[in-house]
């Protein structure tokens, strides 16, 4: 009987109305702010009257905590906004599947339709020659574009060889060679009209899959082509 009586809690008015503390993450701004206020209260209660605490210093510390909290909230809002913009861009670019874009590269997937090709020259050239090869590396056709200015020069390959015969559908290779009046080589970047076969995302980055199997970003597109 005495053992049972010993287990009954005794009423203590000093602790009966003390609210229980909520467990907080010591690394959160809320937790740090509450701990700071507790420490500040204790310091004010126990300060030396002849050497009181500096009010400006305490205020600046509390302001710093509030500033950190504001920055964290701003980062959260910005991340949410970026995610919404990426989602909107993804949905907009989904409409480009099946369309043709002019993209840097030399591979061509010929499907019976003319292909727009382009050469971007670092300097003016006296002669610009375009060569199309098949998968075996054999020359299908060569086009002399003559003298061209620096910048972009476009032309259309109709899918025919040098004899005027239509080539079969398949994969072809584009090659440019340019030289100036002195016979010196001019640097050329080749662009090919490629069909967008699909669109996807990788770690938040939007990727467009071309018909030749390459994955590019929207920034890699030089120009959209008319349907």
Image (spheres, rainbow, N blue to C red):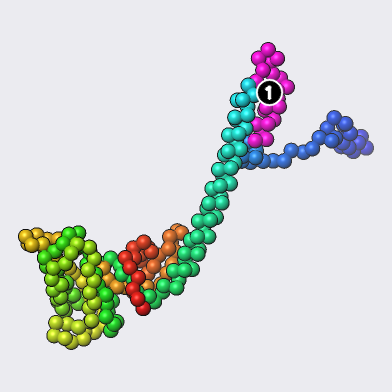
Quarter-of-image position of residue 221: bottom left
Above or below, 66 relative to 95: above
Query: Label 1, on which residue?
Result: 43
Q: Outermost residue, left direction?
A: 182
Camera-nearest residue between 139 and 121? 121
The percent coordinates of residue 156 (x first, y second) are: 24, 77
Q: Position of residue 204 (x, y in %)?
A: 46, 59
Residue 212 to residue 71: above or below: below
- Compared across the picture, whether 27 is left or right of 163 comes to right
Nearer to me, 78 or 1 = 78
Secondary structure of the residue carrying numbered label 1 = helix
* Magenta residues, start to end: 33-53
Is residue 37 part of the magenta span, yes or no?
yes
Q: Residues within 10 Å of mark 1 (few under 14, many from 20)?
A: few
Whether residue 156 is situated above or below residue 20 in the rendered picture: below
Residue drawn at x 49%, y 68% is 91
Tell me: 73 left or right of 52: left
Q: Is residue 190 visible?
A: no
In the image, 185: left or right of 101? left
């Amino acid at each position: 009987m005495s053992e049972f009586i010993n287990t009954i809690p005794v009423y203590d008015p000093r602790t009966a109305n003390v609210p229980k503390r909520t467990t907080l993450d010591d690394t959160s701004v809320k937790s740090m702010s509450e701990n700071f206020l507790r420490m500040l209260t204790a310091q004010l209660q126990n300060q030396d009257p002849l050497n009181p605490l500096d009010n400006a210093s305490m205020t600046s510390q509390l302001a710093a905590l509030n500033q950190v909290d504001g920055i964290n909230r701003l980062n959260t809002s910005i991340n949410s906004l970026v995610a919404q913009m990426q989602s909107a861009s993804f949905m907009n670019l989904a409409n480009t599947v099946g369309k043709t874009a002019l993209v840097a590269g030399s591979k061509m997937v010929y499907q019976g339709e003319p292909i727009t090709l382009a050469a971007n020259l670092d300097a003016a050239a006296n002669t610009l020659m375009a060569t199309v090869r098949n998968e075996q590396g054999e020359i299908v056709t060569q086009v002399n574009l003559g003298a061209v200015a620096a910048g972009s020069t476009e032309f259309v390959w109709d899918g025919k060889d040098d004899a005027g015969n239509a080539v079969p559908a398949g994969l072809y290779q584009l090659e440019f060679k340019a030289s100036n009046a002195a016979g010196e080589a001019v640097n050329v970047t080749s662009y090919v009209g490629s069909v967008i076969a699909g669109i996807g995302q990788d770690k938040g980055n939007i990727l467009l899959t071309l018909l030749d199997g390459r994955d590019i970003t929207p920034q890699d597109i030089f120009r959209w082509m008319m349907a």
